[in-house]
């Protein structure tokens, strides 16, 4: 295992609600090395999404420290966090989260706009990523003209376009049927083989089986962390 | 980057055409009315300035008092208090350029079958110079004509058009009270005066002839009115003071006695007319600006709605790396695009409206490059100003809150 992409120390998140403060995540210590494929599992409400949002620098922890590629993100400002999300992390969401008014190519190229790339370079790289997820020829289509599985591929292409080290996927197959899920998981496995670290939340054991390592949460606590047994191949 | 953002702003505007169009309409009406009102206001200012320039500069009119006019003292029981000798004495004062005694009234002019009523002005040669009035053709009468009371006349354009519809008035004869006058000159066109009277509906004849043949004067040597032109605007106060002192002395008025003449400062009247139109055009502009303001508030309203509707989109953009200034710029661009597009259309509408006003009424309109530029700049400013608050709200959104937004 090479240098850690992710390292959390006593990471916690407490939500302030009308009913009082609610600790959604408590004291999580986790280290994920470069090139790892980790599945996060656990019952609903156990804090998986909360943890993912912290890993993605979308939310700030209430306690503990989080080091992303060696940097303590607690000391970064909003714009630095945005730059970090832009360059180091690719997000894949359960609900795809494509922008409906834009063509697929423009959707995929959007992170490059914020990275300050020139137009022709954006175009070229977006087309390459679309081809990489098997959607060459769909550049001009709109998100509502393609299937859910294809939309998730576009989202993956968008996550990949700025060549991140890490992909965070929160239930990426949650809205897909099992056949399409298998295709998407194949794509993730491929990407992982190419050296990209992947952290993926799922409820399903066969999806989690694609990962080399499985982490379990319960009631905001990290309860188990073990390698996938090789008897149940992906 | 800039181009990508402009493209996106364009797309966003196109995504809800009706809404963008209606928002734009607010700007169209705002800018259109500002341009139109400025055109009308500046037109009014222009035509007043034009009128003032036809009046002659640095002018005073001294009007004689009489017992019938507001209880002013009169030494000679109802006759005018001013005399031609007064006029000659005023002409000797420092700072006085031209002095012309004037006797005028409306008379019936007759030429063959044509009959026309016009203002007949009896005066002396300096009158034309004082009023900066040139001849279109012919020549003016001289001092010898005044001395000899010859029956010569200079005719204004309106009177000429009506008396001599198809012929050259030069050398023709008009009759006033059976007296034939030979037209020796045709006056250049002047247009209306500040009171709206047509200055070209006139006939100018020697003062002596006017008094003897036309108006009849039971008080020889007296005159109703004297026109006095100062050499410059700066000289006017001094001229006014010395003129009053001179006339009081000549009329033997004791200290504490009222003047037996009126002094009217035409330059001051012109200034106040110019000031009035200036205030009017300012007021028009101010009223029109209110609609521009309303248009701007419309933009703000729509942008706020748009930010709320697109909260999730903002969250997605932030997740993939948009900084606060990127989101700010995006919404600011959209507001700016709506306001600038509305402004461009508004300019056309305003200019069109001004041209239409000009075609349908006889109102003078002036569309100046500056007023167009200024309203354009103001509209762009309105877009930025009213777009800034919604854009800042968008940029200040918390990434995770925005992403969770349904
Ligand atoms: N913004 C919030 N404010 C208050 N409480 C929250 C908020 N977000 C999450 N929670 C609470 O924190 C707990 C953990 O939520 P989280 O979304 O992390 O669960 P999860 O493991 O992702 O569940 P699921 O499998 O259903 O997605 C839940 O009990 C939830 O009610
Ligand atoms: Mg979740």
Image: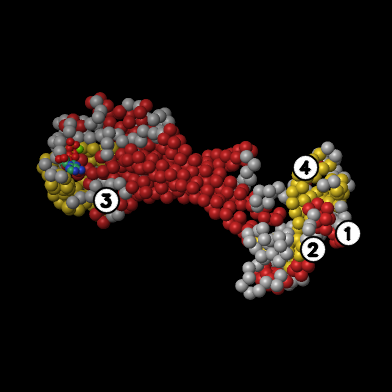
- Residue where numbered disc 4 is placed: B116
Q: In x, y percent, where is residue B354?
A: 59, 42
Pointer 3 and pointer 1: residues touching (CB < 8 Å)? no
SS at circle 1: helix
- Using the image, name the chain to which the residue with label 3 belongs: A
Residue A4 can be seen, yes or no: no
Is the residue at mark 2 in contact range of ligand 1, meaning its CB lies under 8 Å from it? no
In whole angstroms, how far apart are the C-alphas of marks 2 and 4? 30 Å
Q: Hey, which residue is sitting farthest front in the picture?
A: B77
**Marks 1 & 4 on one chain:** yes
Q: In x, y percent, where is residue A133?
A: 34, 32
* Nearer to us: label 3 or label 2: 2
Q: Using the image, tell me which numbered label, if any, was put on residue A69.
A: 3
Dot 1 crowding, Cα within 10 Å, few <14, some 14–19, many 20+: few
- Using the image, name the chain to which the residue with label 2 belongs: B
In whole angstroms, how far apart are the C-alphas of marks 3 and 2? 111 Å
């Amino acid at each position: 295992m090479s240098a850690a992409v992710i390292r959390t120390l006593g990471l916690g998140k407490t939500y302030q609600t009308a009913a009082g403060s609610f600790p959604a995540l408590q004291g999580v210590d986790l280290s994920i090395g470069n090139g790892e494929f980790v599945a996060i599992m656990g019952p609903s409400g156990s804090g998986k999404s909360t943890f993912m949002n912290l890993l993605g620098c979308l939310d700030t922890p209430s306690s503990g420290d989080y080091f992303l590629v060696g940097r303590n993100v607690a000391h970064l400002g909003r714009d630095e966090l945005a730059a970090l999300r832009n360059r180091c992390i690719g997000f894949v969401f359960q609900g795809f989260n494509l922008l409906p008014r834009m063509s697929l190519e423009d959707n995929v190229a959007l992170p490059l706009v914020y990275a300050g790339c020139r137009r022709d370079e954006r175009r070229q790289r977006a087309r390459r990523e679309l081809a990489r997820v098997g959607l060459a020829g769909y550049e001009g289509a709109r998100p509502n003209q393609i299937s859910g599985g294809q939309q998730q591929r576009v989202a993956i292409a968008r996550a990949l376009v700025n060549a991140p080290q890490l992909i965070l996927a929160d239930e990426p197959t949650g809205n897909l049927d099992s056949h399409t899920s298998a295709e998407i998981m194949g794509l993730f496995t491929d990407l992982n083989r190419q050296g990209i670290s992947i952290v993926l939340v799922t409820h399903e054991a066969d999806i989690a089986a694609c990962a080399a390592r499985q982490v379990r949460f319960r009631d905001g606590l990290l309860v188990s962390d073990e390698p996938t047994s090789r008897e149940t191949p992906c | 980057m800039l181009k990508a953002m402009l493209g996106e702003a364009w797309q966003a505007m196109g995504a809800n055409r009706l809404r963008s169009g209606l928002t734009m309409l607010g700007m169209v009406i705002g800018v259109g009315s500002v341009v139109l009102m400025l055109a009308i206001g500046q037109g009014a200012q222009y035509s007043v300035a034009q009128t003032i320039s036809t009046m002659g500069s640095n002018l005073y009119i001294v009007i004689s008092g009489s017992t019938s006019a507001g209880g002013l003292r009169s030494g000679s029981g109802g006759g005018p208090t001013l005399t031609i000798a007064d006029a000659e004495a005023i002409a000797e004062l420092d700072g006085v350029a031209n002095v012309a005694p004037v006797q005028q009234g409306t008379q019936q002019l007759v030429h063959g079958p044509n009959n026309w009523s016009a203002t007949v002005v009896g005066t002396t040669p300096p009158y034309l110079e004082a009023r900066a009035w040139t001849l279109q053709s012919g020549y003016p009468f001289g001092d010898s004509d005044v001395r000899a009371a010859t029956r010569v006349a200079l005719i204004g354009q309106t009177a000429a058009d009506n008396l001599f519809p198809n012929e050259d008035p030069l050398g023709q004869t008009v009759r006033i009270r059976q007296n034939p006058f030979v037209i020796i000159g045709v006056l250049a066109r002047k247009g209306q005066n500040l009171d709206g009277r047509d200055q070209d509906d006139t006939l100018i004849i020697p003062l002596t002839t006017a008094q003897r043949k036309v108006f009849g004067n039971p008080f020889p040597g007296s005159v109703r009115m004297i026109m006095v032109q100062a050499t410059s605007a700066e000289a006017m106060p001094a001229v006014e003071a010395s003129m009053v002192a001179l006339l009081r002395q000549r009329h033997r008025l004791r200290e504490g006695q009222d003047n037996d003449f009126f002094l009217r400062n035409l330059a001051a009247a012109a200034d106040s007319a110019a000031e009035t139109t200036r205030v009017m055009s300012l007021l028009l502009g101010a009223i029109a600006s209110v609609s521009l303001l309303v248009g701007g508030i419309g933009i703000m309203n729509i942008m706020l709605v748009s930010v709320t509707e697109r909260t999730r989109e903002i969250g997605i953009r932030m997740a993939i790396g948009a900084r606060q200034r990127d989101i700010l710029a995006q919404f600011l661009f959209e507001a700016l695009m709506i306001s600038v597009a509305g402004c461009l259309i508004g300019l056309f509408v305003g200019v069109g409206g001004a041209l239409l006003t000009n075609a349908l009424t006889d109102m003078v309109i002036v569309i100046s490059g500056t007023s167009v530029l200024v309203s354009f700049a103001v509209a762009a400013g309105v877009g930025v100003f009213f777009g800034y608050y919604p854009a800042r709200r968008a940029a200040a959104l918390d990434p995770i809150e925005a992403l969770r937004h349904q």
